[in-house]
Image (cartoon, helix red, strand yellow):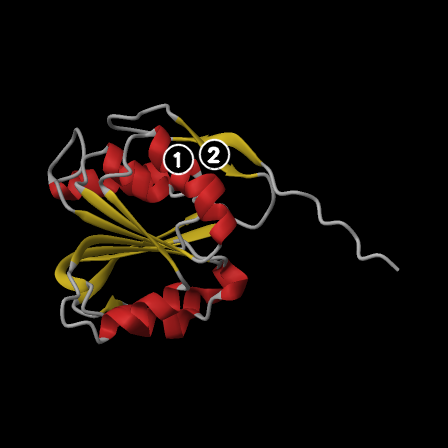
Amino acid sequence: DKAPLLEPRTVHKLLRVMGGKNNGKKLLSPNDSSVRPMMEVVRGAVFNMLQARGGYTGGLPPGKWLDLYSGTGSVGIEALSRGCLAAHFIEMDPWVISKVLKPNLEATNYTEQSVVHMLKVETYLEKQATNPKAEVFDYISVTPPYEAVHYPTLMEQLSTSPLVGDYTYVIVEYPLKSKQEMPEACGPLAKIVDRRYGRTHLAVYGP
C-alpha cells in the first residue's frame, strides 16, 4: 500500500498587531492546530498592563523581549511594535519559522531587531543556564502548547535562569488543569497577576 499523502501545510492571515507602529498589520499563522497563538484579547490585556506598569501610556519602555514557543511571533512582534528595541524568538518547527515567523518579521520590518533560534525551549534554557554571557531580558513571554509542557519543570528552569533579572516581567499562559502547578514566585519575582480569559489562564511575575 502507498503511504497516504500528507496535506501540504498552508497559512492564512487572521492575526493582527494590536498597537504601536504596526497597529492593524495582518500576520500569517498556520492554517492548522500546530500553533496556538495567544488570543488577541489576552495579548491586548497583557500589553496594556505592562505599559501601565512601565508608566508608558503610548507604548513599552525600550527593552529586550524573549518570546518562548514563539510560533507566529505575534507576541514578540507586538512588543517591537510597541517600543521594544530587540526580540529573540525561540521556535523548534522549521516550517513555522520559514513560512510564518520570518515572513511576519519581514512584513513588519523587524528582521534587523530580531534573532530567531530554532530549537526546543527546554534546550535553549539549558544552554543559557551555563552561558557566562547570558543576558537578562526585560520581558519573557511563555505561550506553550499546553499538552507538550510540564509546567513545574518549565517554571523551575525559568526561576533559576540567568535570563530572569530583578526587574524582568515573565508572562505565562497555562490551562486550568495546571493552576495548582503555578508557583507564587519565579526566581526573584512575585506573581502579580493571575487571571482567566475563557479557557486561557495567565500568570504574570514581576518586580
- The quadrant in which residue 129 appears is bottom left
Whole-angstrom CA distance, mark 1 to mark 2, is 6 Å
Q: Residues at badges 1 and 2 in contact (C-beta under 8 Å)?
A: yes
Q: Residue furthest front?
A: 2
Residue 46: % across, % down:
30, 43
The reply to whether residue 199 is in sight is no
Q: Position of residue 76 (x, y in %)?
A: 31, 43
Asked if residue 188 lies left or right of residue 69, the reply is left
Q: How many marks?
A: 2
Viewer-closest of 59 and 137:
137
Disc 2 marks a residue whose amino acid type is Leu
Q: Which quadrant holds residue 23?
A: top left
Label located before the other in sequence (1 or 2): 2
Residue at figure coordinates x 79%, y 53% from the top left: 4
Q: Which residue is mark 1?
A: 104
Classify 146 as above or below 37: below
Given the current orientation, which residue lies at the most extreme top position? 24
Q: Along the line of sight, which residue is nearer the eye, 148 or 101?
A: 101
Residue 7 lies in quadrant: top right
- Residue 6 visible from this viewpoint: yes
Q: Position of residue 9 (x, y in %)?
A: 62, 43
Q: Going by the picture, which residue comes out furthest to the right?
A: 1
- At mark 1, the secondary structure is helix
Looking at the image, which residue is at 49% across and 40% down? 99
